[in-house]
Image (cartoon, rainbow, N blue to C red):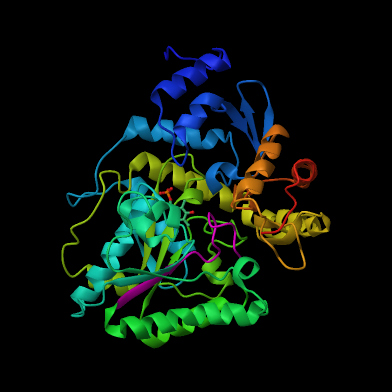
Amino acid sequence: MSVISNHMPTEELQALDAAHHMHPFTCNGELAQKGARIITRASGVTLTDSEGHEILDAMAGLWCVNIGYGRDELADVAARQMRELPYYNTFFQTTHRPVIELSHKIAELAPDELNNVFFAGSGSEANDTNIRMVRHYWALKGKPSKSVIISRKNAYHGSTVGAGSLGGMSAMHEQGGMPIADVHHINQPNWWAEGGDSNPEDFGLARAQELEQAILELGEDRVAAFIAEPVQGAGGVIIPPKSYWPEIQRICDKYEILLIADEVICGFGRTGDWFASEALNIRPDIITIAKGLSSGYSPIGGSIVSDEVASVIATGEFNHGYTYSGHPVAAAVALENLRILEEEDILGHVKNVAAPYLKERWEALTDHPLVGEAKITGLMGSIALTPNKETRAAFAAETGTVGYICRERCFANDLVMRHVGDRMIISPPLIIKPNEIDLLMERATRSLDECLEHLQRNDMLRSA
Ligand SMILES: *Cc1c(COP(=O)(O)O)cnc(C)c1O
C-alpha cells in the first residue's frame, strides 16, 4: 500500500509534490508557490480533483485519451498480460503474441503501402527512430549525402534531442543545444498569424512551395525527408489551407523526398479517419504514431513504415531499438483500445455525431468579441483571440498573456482548454456526447466572457 493517499489534504500533497517532483514544460519555482492541481480519478470525459471539482477534460489528457477515461477492459487486459508475460524484449530474434497481433492490426488499418511497424515507447522516440531510419535508408541506397530532414517552424514532434530538433519550437531550441545538425525548418501554413493580405489558398500554396525552394537551395542530393503533422497540434491546431498538402505531396514526389506524416495526434480517429493522411490524400512513407494508439492507457509509440523503406532497411542490421519496443503490456492495451474503437464504431460517432455538432457550435464562437477565427477538423479545434478581428491584430501584451488569462478562467470554470500563445485549443475524448459538448461550450463561452471582462478592466484590449 502507498503511504501517500488521495485522502491527504490537498496542501500536503502539493507540498510533497513541490518538494520532489520536477514537472515537464513548467516553471517549477512558480508552481511550487501556487501548488499543482491534483487529479484523483476520471471517468468518460470528466476528471475529478482533490477538492472534488468535476472538470470537463476538453484536451483528452494530452490529446491521447481518445476512448475516454475509466474503461475497465483496458485495465483487465493489462492485468492479464502482466500475469502471463509482463515483459520480454524483441531484440534477440524473439517476439510475442501481443506485438505480433498489434503489428498486424496496425498494418491492416494503415494506408495500403504501410505494412511494417517499428515500436517505441513514445512519439518522441518514434521520431528519433525516423531520423535514423530515413538517413540509414538513403545510405543503404548509396546516397549517404541525403541526410537533411526538412521540418517546419512551430511544429511539434516531441521533446527528445532528436524529436525536439525536428520540431520548430524556438523556446525549446533555446535550451540544451538543439537543433542537431542537418535539420532545416521552413515556415508553417498559419494564415491567421502570418498570411498578411494574401488569401488563405494562395498563402497555403506559397508556404508549401517553400519546401521546393529549400530542396533547391540545399541540393536534392542532400535532402532525406520532409516531416510534418497533417494538422499541427501543439503549435495551436493550425489547419492548413486546402492548397497546402497537394503541393507538398507533388514536391516530395518530384524530388524523391521521403514524407513522414507525424500522426501522433491525428491518428486513430482524432480527425474522424484512422489516419488524417487518408482524408488529405497524403501518401507518406512513414507515419509516426503514439497517443491515441493506446488512448494514453499505457505508453507506446511507433513508426509505420512503407514496404519500400522497410525492405531496404531489412537488408542489414539496423542498430537501433528501445528496451520497451513492442512492450507486451503496452501492446495488449493498444490492441484492446483498437478493438473498442472498431467495435463501438467510435470513428463513426466522431464523423456523424460529435464532429458535425461540435463544428457548428465551435464556429459560432466567432460571434464572440474576442474570437477572430474558429477552426476545427474532426475533434481538434482552435480559436484565435484578438483585440481586432478586421486586422487580425495580436495583443499589445506579450504573446500568450491573454491566452493564459483565458486558460485560468477555463480552469476556474471546470474546463480543461489549453492555450498556445493566444490561441485556445481543444481536443476532447472521441466519445464526447452532444450534451457534453453543450457543457463544454457553455463553460468555454463563460470563460471567454470573463477573460474579456478582465481585459477591459485592465485596459488590455489593445493591439500590438
Ligand atoms: C505529443 C507529440 C509527439 C511526442 O509524443 P510523446 O509521446 O510526448 O513523446 C510527437 N508528435 C506529435 C505530433 C505530438 O503531438
What is the x, y in percent for residue 64? 53, 46
Inspect this view and state whether residue 215 appears: yes
User: What residue is drawn where x is 29% and y is 69%?
Assistant: 182
Q: Nearer the viewer, residue 225 or 171?
A: 171
User: What residue is drawn where x is 42% and y is 59%?
Assistant: 167
Q: Nearer the viewer, residue 341 or 30?
A: 30
Quadrant of the rendered structure where residue 302 is?
A: bottom left
Magenta part of the protein: which range?
223-239
**Please, what is the dominant secondary structure of the magenta stretch?**
loop
Q: Is residue 227 magenta?
A: yes
Q: Is residue 269 magenta?
A: no
Q: Nearer the viewer, residue 105 or 358?
A: 358
Residue 188 is left or right of residue 403, and the answer is left
Report the label total: 0
Residue 412 is left or right of residue 247, and the answer is right
Looking at the image, residue 79 lies above or below residue 234: above
Q: Nearer the viewer, residue 311 or 458?
A: 458
Outermost residue, right side: 367
Residue 464 is left or right of residue 174, and the answer is right
